[in-house]
Image: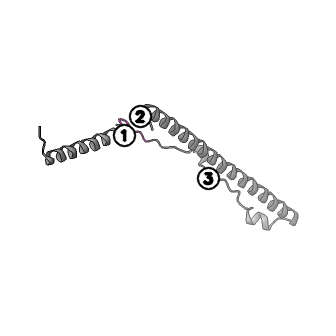
Amino acid sequence: MFISKWFRISLLIVICLAVVVLAGCTTTPKSVVVTKTEKEVVVIPKHLLFKCKVTPPPNVEIYVNSSIEKREDMLINTNVALYQDLGNCNNQIEEISKFQDRQVKLIEEFNREINAKFESQYGK
């Protein structure tokens, strides 16, 4: 039986296109349907958000009417109190930083778990 040259070329082109289309279908990734999304707000605990206490300077009238020794005592006591205030404020900031670090670790751990579940279910 005689098959024309054009028919053979057309058949070859159709077969090549079919192979390309089928090869493309086998490499497409599986689709994932997200059925639920949640938003979560990480809130810093209220006990870490209070304003830092600042010890006020001595009362002007009492300070002016005091002896030199008493003035020195007032200034030293105020200075010590301010250093304590600063230390308390730094501790508060450190606690906020630790809280934030814990939250970041929790989120990273959660993301690793979700990615592992996704990869085990759908492949890489």
Mostly what secondary structure, the magenta segment? Answer: loop
Mark pair 1, 2: CA separation: 9 Å
Mark yes or no: residue 45 visible. Answer: no
The tag on residue 29 is 1
Q: Earlier in the sequence, mark 2 or mark 3?
A: 3
Q: In which image quadrant can residue 29 be found?
A: top left
Nearer to us of marks 3 and 1 is 1
Residue at numbered disc 3: 51
Mark pair 2, 3: CA separation: 50 Å
Label 3 sits on a secondary structure element that is loop
Q: Is residue 118 left or right of residue 46?
A: left
**Mark 3 Cα shell of 10 Å, populated few (<14), some (14-19), many (≥20):** few
Q: Is residue 37 magenta?
A: yes
Callout 1–callout 2 Cβ contact below 8 Å: yes
Which amino acid does the dot numbered 3 rest on? Lys
Q: Decide: is 60 above or below 87.
A: below
Q: In which image quadrant can residue 61 be found?
A: bottom right
Which amino acid does the dot numbered 1 rest on? Pro
Residue at numbered disc 2: 122
Nearer to us of marks 2 and 3 is 2
Q: Position of residue 99 (x, y in %)?
A: 61, 44
Q: Return the residue nearer the eye: 117 or 102.
A: 117
Q: Decide: is 70 above or below 97.
A: below
Q: Residue furthest bottom?
A: 64
Q: Is residue 57 left or right of residue 116?
A: right
x 77%, y 63%: residue: 62
